[in-house]
Amino acid sequence: MPDTPGRTRVPLRTPTLRTARLLLRPFAERDVEPLFALQSNARVLRYSDSPPWTDRDRAHAFIAACRQMEEDGSGARLAIETWGDHAFVGWCAMFRWNPVYRSLGIGYCLDEPAWGQGYATEAVRAMLQWAYGALDLNRVEAELDTRNAASARVLEKLGFEREGLRREDCVVAGEVSDSWIYGLLRSDWKADPTAVRVVDGPRG
């Protein structure tokens, strides 16, 4: 989405959020190794719009980009770890934040050991609960490969509606794929203040 006329860029401080089982926090340099392991796993990135990483420098660049997103106010990426043992299990992100349109996009990526435990739904619910309050959102959008049934279930559990199809939207490693577009309006969002506690950062 291009910049909107009249939009003033301001920093967007990345929050730290706690749920029943997870901690969502800003990325740090200690995340380089687990992040590289996650993003170099071909099974994890099966339906991603980019191929698995082969260079560890990509992890450093990813974390640097997190800081840049925060500084320019375009969004935020949050590392996800389990609350008890602080094991890194993935990340979730908000991007294309537009305060004029009151909209943003989201994405998420969870490691294999975290699959099937409801962590993605729990983490994204917490991020949305924070964002709808702190950013006064009206609309959130997500895009995913049409073959990614597990990710679609996460969005549908959170109230997203499937709104459209982008045909042959991505070509990764020579493989062409279509994308579903999902949207969640403020009027459809079922807020649950008990789903998250803001440990640090802006509050709604």
Image: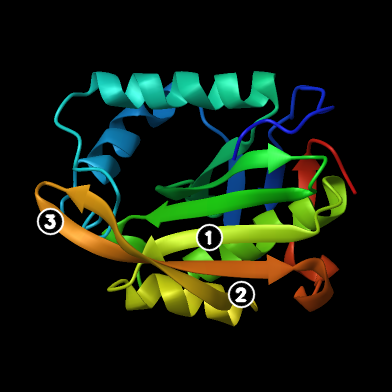
Q: Looking at the rendered structure, which numbered label has been put on residue 160?
A: 2
Q: Can you name the residue that lies furthest to the right here? A: 204
Of 42 and 198, which appears nearest the observer? 42
What is the CA distance from the residue labelled 1 to the residue labelled 2?
9 Å
* Residue at position x 33%, y 72% in the image: 146
User: Which amino acid type is marked by label 3?
Assistant: Glu
Q: Report which residue position mark 1 lands on.
A: 142
* Residue at position x 67%, y 20% in the image: 72
Between discs 3 and 2, the one toward the N terminus: 2
Between discs 1 and 3, the one toward the N terminus: 1
User: Which amino acid type is marked by label 1?
Assistant: Ala
Q: Compared to 97, does 41 lie above or below?
A: below
Between discs 1 and 2, the one toward the N terminus: 1
Mark 2 residue crowding within 10 angstroms, few (<14) / some (14–19) / many (20+): many
At mark 3, the secondary structure is strand
What is the CA distance from the residue labelled 1 to the residue labelled 3?
21 Å
At mark 2, the secondary structure is loop
